[in-house]
């Protein structure tokens, strides 16, 4: 990678850096706006940048996911703080219903997913965000499935499943959390605010899992702790933190319907790109 980076034109390097800053701003804005971790943007962009820099195909998706999870930690905490100040976080729902099963699922995902084949992660990530995108398009016409969230085994299935899936694909769990809560009659603003904190719960153990599973991997780019790249983190996190607060403000002033549809279009376009890349021969 270092040899290829030295061969890249200075203009292309500057474009990659600028793109990373924009990706951070976009992911942070979405984190504040929709209560998601922004990982759908950062994973796709980091995968592209690691591909451009010549990182081995077997490591690209693992690095993208691990680095994305690391950026989600500060962004999630910052976003949740903003939503809490706006009165949109249900602390009892967060701590009493979601916290323990989310953490359990994230620990399991972080321990296992560093060993999943890169191609499987790419295809799974694309399918995951495509389904979420379709849901966001259809959500304006759907009614809640039930008047309240399921207790007992249903609670653990929702929480553990969210933690496992989100840690697998480098996202903060907010997308699934908002879907689950709005489907069970939780108001959209309350669902967005409460799910904003899911990212930190999921990303801390999952990031550690990606660090440990990639610790002895050969051919990783410089400044990597296992499958977490510190250079990628440093480029994306600052813009994401600034934009997250702005996203929170917008979320409490604008209708969600049109914003959800824009987000859905982005998700589906990203899924198409990832599926196309998965079908192409590795470079």
Image: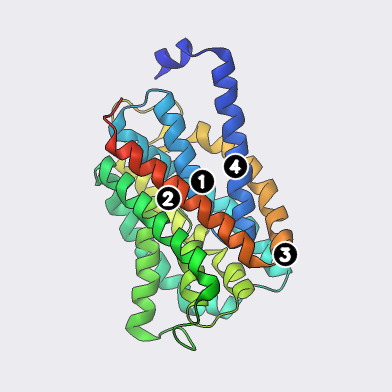
Q: Does the CB distance between marks 2 and 3 fall below 8 Å?
A: no
Q: Disc 2 marks which residue? A: 170
How does the figure colour the protein chain or chains? rainbow
Q: Disc 4 marks which residue? A: 24
Q: Earlier in the sequence, mark 2 or mark 3?
A: 2
Real-space Cα separation, disc 4 to disc 3, in angstroms: 22 Å
Q: Disc 1 marks which residue? A: 41
Nearest-to-viewer mark from 2 and 1: 1
The residue that appears at 46% across and 29% down in the rendered structure is 223
Nearest-to-viewer mark from 2 and 3: 3
**For the view shown, which residue lies furthest in the bottom direction?**
147
Say what secondary structure mark 1 lies in: helix
Q: Residue 254 carries which label?
A: 3
Q: Quadrant of the C terminus?
A: top left
Nearest-to-viewer mark from 4 and 1: 1
Q: Earlier in the sequence, mark 4 or mark 3?
A: 4
Q: Where is residue 80 in the image (x, y as percent from the top left)?
A: 63, 63
């Amino acid at each position: 990678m270092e040899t290829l980076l030295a061969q890249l034109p200075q203009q292309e390097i500057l474009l990659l850096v600028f793109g990373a800053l924009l990706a951070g701003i976009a992911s942070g804005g979405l984190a504040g706006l929709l209560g998601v971790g922004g990982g759908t943007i950062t994973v796709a962009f980091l995968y592209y940048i690691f591909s451009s820099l010549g990182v081995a195909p077997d490591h690209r998706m693992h690095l993208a996911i691990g680095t994305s999870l690391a950026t989600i930690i500060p962004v999630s905490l910052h976003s949740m703080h903003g939503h809490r100040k706006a009165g949109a976080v249900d602390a009892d729902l967060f701590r009493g219903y979601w916290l323990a099963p989310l953490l359990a699922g994230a620990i399991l995902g972080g321990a296992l997913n560093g060993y999943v084949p890169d191609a499987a992660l790419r295809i799974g990530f694309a399918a995951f965000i495509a389904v979420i995108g379709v849901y966001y398009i259809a959500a304006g016409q759907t009614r809640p499935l039930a008047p309240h969230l399921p207790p007992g085994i249903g609670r653990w299935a929702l929480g553990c499943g969210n933690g496992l899936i989100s840690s697998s694909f480098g996202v903060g769990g907010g997308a699934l959390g908002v879907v689950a809560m709005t489907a069970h009659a939780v108001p959209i603003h309350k669902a967005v605010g409460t799910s904003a904190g899911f990212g930190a719960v999921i990303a801390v153990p999952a990031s550690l899992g990606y660090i440990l599973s990639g610790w002895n991997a050969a051919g990783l780019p410089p400044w990597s702790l296992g499958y977490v790249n510190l250079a990628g983190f440093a480029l994306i996190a600052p813009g994401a933190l600034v934009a997250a607060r702005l996203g929170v403000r917008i979320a409490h002033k604008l209708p969600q319907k049109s914003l959800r549809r824009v987000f859905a279009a982005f998700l589906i376009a990203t899924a198409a790109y990832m599926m196309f890349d998965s079908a192409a021969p590795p470079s």
